[in-house]
Amino acid sequence: MAAGTVQAGSHEVSASAVTRVGKILRATKLDEVPQLWNVVKGDMSLVGPRPCLPMQVELIEERKSRGVLEVLPGITGLAQVEGIDMSDPVRLAEKDADYIREHSFRLDMEILFRTVLGKGSGDRVRETQDN
Protein backbone atom coordinates (compact mmCIF):
# COMPACT_ATOMS: atom_id res chain seq x y z
CA MET A 1 0.00 0.00 0.00
CA ALA A 2 1.10 3.54 -0.63
CA ALA A 3 2.39 5.58 2.30
CA GLY A 4 -0.41 7.22 4.25
CA THR A 5 -3.08 4.67 3.33
CA VAL A 6 -5.58 4.22 6.15
CA GLN A 7 -5.71 0.86 7.91
CA ALA A 8 -8.88 -0.73 6.58
CA GLY A 9 -10.15 -3.80 4.82
CA SER A 10 -8.92 -4.14 1.24
CA HIS A 11 -12.45 -3.59 -0.07
CA GLU A 12 -12.48 -0.19 1.69
CA VAL A 13 -9.23 1.06 0.11
CA SER A 14 -9.04 2.52 -3.37
CA ALA A 15 -7.13 0.72 -6.10
CA SER A 16 -4.81 3.72 -6.40
CA ALA A 17 -3.48 2.97 -2.89
CA VAL A 18 -1.99 -0.35 -4.08
CA THR A 19 1.56 0.15 -5.37
CA ARG A 20 2.99 -1.66 -8.42
CA VAL A 21 5.02 -3.92 -6.15
CA GLY A 22 1.92 -4.52 -4.04
CA LYS A 23 -0.05 -5.59 -7.12
CA ILE A 24 2.67 -8.10 -7.99
CA LEU A 25 2.87 -9.40 -4.42
CA ARG A 26 -0.92 -9.84 -4.26
CA ALA A 27 -1.16 -11.45 -7.71
CA THR A 28 1.59 -13.96 -6.94
CA LYS A 29 0.37 -14.46 -3.34
CA LEU A 30 3.84 -13.59 -2.05
CA ASP A 31 2.16 -11.24 0.41
CA GLU A 32 0.98 -14.37 2.24
CA VAL A 33 4.49 -15.80 2.80
CA PRO A 34 5.01 -14.08 6.20
CA GLN A 35 1.89 -15.84 7.45
CA LEU A 36 3.66 -19.18 7.02
CA TRP A 37 5.58 -18.31 10.19
CA ASN A 38 2.23 -18.08 12.00
CA VAL A 39 1.37 -21.56 10.69
CA VAL A 40 4.70 -22.93 11.98
CA LYS A 41 4.02 -21.30 15.39
CA GLY A 42 0.56 -22.88 15.51
CA ASP A 43 -1.31 -19.56 15.47
CA MET A 44 -2.80 -20.23 12.01
CA SER A 45 -3.45 -23.10 9.67
CA LEU A 46 -2.93 -23.30 5.93
CA VAL A 47 -6.68 -23.55 5.36
CA GLY A 48 -9.41 -21.96 7.45
CA PRO A 49 -11.43 -18.76 7.72
CA ARG A 50 -9.27 -15.82 6.67
CA PRO A 51 -8.38 -13.47 9.54
CA CYS A 52 -9.95 -10.03 9.56
CA LEU A 53 -9.09 -6.68 11.07
CA PRO A 54 -10.32 -5.82 14.59
CA MET A 55 -12.27 -2.88 13.13
CA GLN A 56 -14.42 -5.20 10.99
CA VAL A 57 -17.00 -5.44 13.78
CA GLU A 58 -19.90 -6.68 11.64
CA LEU A 59 -17.84 -9.58 10.30
CA ILE A 60 -16.56 -10.45 13.78
CA GLU A 61 -20.11 -10.51 15.15
CA GLU A 62 -21.37 -12.64 12.25
CA ARG A 63 -18.49 -15.08 12.73
CA LYS A 64 -18.99 -15.15 16.51
CA SER A 65 -22.67 -16.04 16.12
CA ARG A 66 -21.74 -18.96 13.85
CA GLY A 67 -18.85 -20.31 15.93
CA VAL A 68 -16.27 -19.42 13.30
CA LEU A 69 -13.96 -17.72 15.80
CA GLU A 70 -13.49 -21.06 17.59
CA VAL A 71 -11.16 -22.40 14.87
CA LEU A 72 -7.72 -21.26 13.75
CA PRO A 73 -7.69 -18.74 10.92
CA GLY A 74 -6.10 -19.83 7.66
CA ILE A 75 -3.91 -18.39 4.94
CA THR A 76 -6.51 -19.47 2.40
CA GLY A 77 -10.09 -20.56 2.79
CA LEU A 78 -13.25 -21.80 1.15
CA ALA A 79 -14.80 -18.34 0.95
CA GLN A 80 -11.65 -16.96 -0.66
CA VAL A 81 -11.51 -19.54 -3.45
CA GLU A 82 -15.21 -18.99 -4.07
CA GLY A 83 -14.64 -15.25 -4.55
CA ILE A 84 -16.33 -14.06 -1.36
CA ASP A 85 -14.42 -11.27 0.30
CA MET A 86 -14.86 -9.21 3.44
CA SER A 87 -17.10 -6.67 1.72
CA ASP A 88 -20.03 -9.08 2.32
CA PRO A 89 -19.67 -10.02 6.01
CA VAL A 90 -22.86 -12.09 6.30
CA ARG A 91 -22.15 -14.18 3.21
CA LEU A 92 -18.50 -14.58 4.24
CA ALA A 93 -19.41 -15.75 7.77
CA GLU A 94 -21.95 -18.19 6.33
CA LYS A 95 -19.33 -19.67 3.99
CA ASP A 96 -16.81 -19.86 6.85
CA ALA A 97 -19.39 -21.80 8.89
CA ASP A 98 -20.00 -24.10 5.89
CA TYR A 99 -16.27 -24.80 5.78
CA ILE A 100 -16.22 -25.72 9.48
CA ARG A 101 -19.21 -28.08 9.08
CA GLU A 102 -17.76 -29.74 5.95
CA HIS A 103 -14.12 -29.74 7.10
CA SER A 104 -12.07 -32.68 5.88
CA PHE A 105 -8.56 -33.38 4.64
CA ARG A 106 -9.97 -33.73 1.11
CA LEU A 107 -11.69 -30.33 1.29
CA ASP A 108 -8.48 -28.71 2.56
CA MET A 109 -6.52 -30.25 -0.32
CA GLU A 110 -9.14 -29.02 -2.81
CA ILE A 111 -8.97 -25.48 -1.37
CA LEU A 112 -5.15 -25.50 -1.47
CA PHE A 113 -5.21 -26.77 -5.06
CA ARG A 114 -7.72 -24.10 -6.09
CA THR A 115 -5.61 -21.44 -4.36
CA VAL A 116 -2.46 -22.50 -6.22
CA LEU A 117 -4.41 -22.42 -9.51
CA GLY A 118 -5.29 -18.78 -8.90
CA LYS A 119 -8.74 -18.94 -7.36
CA GLY A 120 -9.19 -16.45 -4.57
CA SER A 121 -7.25 -13.58 -6.05
CA GLY A 122 -7.54 -11.65 -2.80
CA ASP A 123 -9.93 -9.10 -1.44
CA ARG A 124 -11.10 -6.59 -3.97
CA VAL A 125 -10.16 -2.94 -3.70
CA ARG A 126 -12.42 -0.02 -4.59
CA GLU A 127 -12.00 1.19 -8.14
CA THR A 128 -12.34 4.87 -7.20
CA GLN A 129 -9.20 6.96 -6.90
CA ASP A 130 -9.70 8.28 -3.35
CA ASN A 131 -8.02 6.64 -0.35
Image: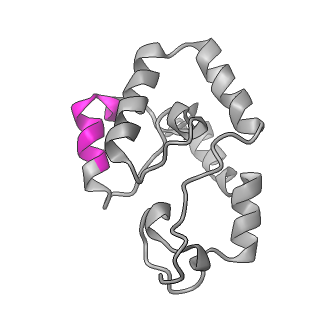
Residue 53 in the image: state x and y as whole percent. 39, 57
Residue 78 falls in image quadrant:
top right
Protein image colouring: one colour
Residue 112 in the image: state x and y as whole percent. 68, 30
Q: Is residue 74 left or right of residue 60?
A: right
Q: Is residue 38 left or right of residue 24?
A: left
Q: Is residue 101 left or right of residue 129?
A: left
Q: Residue sitting at 43 percent across and 51 percent down?
A: 86
Residue 127 magenta: no
| Region in magenta | 59-69
Residue 66 magenta: yes
User: Can residue 1 be spotted in the picture?
Assistant: no
Residue 71 in the image: state x and y as whole percent. 40, 29
Residue 8 falls in image quadrant:
bottom left
In the displayed structure, 67 sits above or below 35; it is above
User: Can residue 23 be spotted in the picture?
Assistant: yes
Q: Residue sitting at 47 percent across and 14 percent down?
A: 102
Residue, far front: 128
Residue 87 falls in image quadrant:
bottom left
Considering the whole magenta stretch, tell me its main secondary structure.
Answer: helix
In the displayed structure, 74 sits above or below 27; it is above
* Quadrant housing the N terminus: bottom right
Q: Residue sitting at 30 percent across and 37 percent down?
A: 63
Q: Residue sitting at 51 percent across and 77 percent down?
A: 128
Q: Nearer the viewer, residue 74 or 120?
A: 120
Residue 23 in the image: state x and y as whole percent. 71, 67
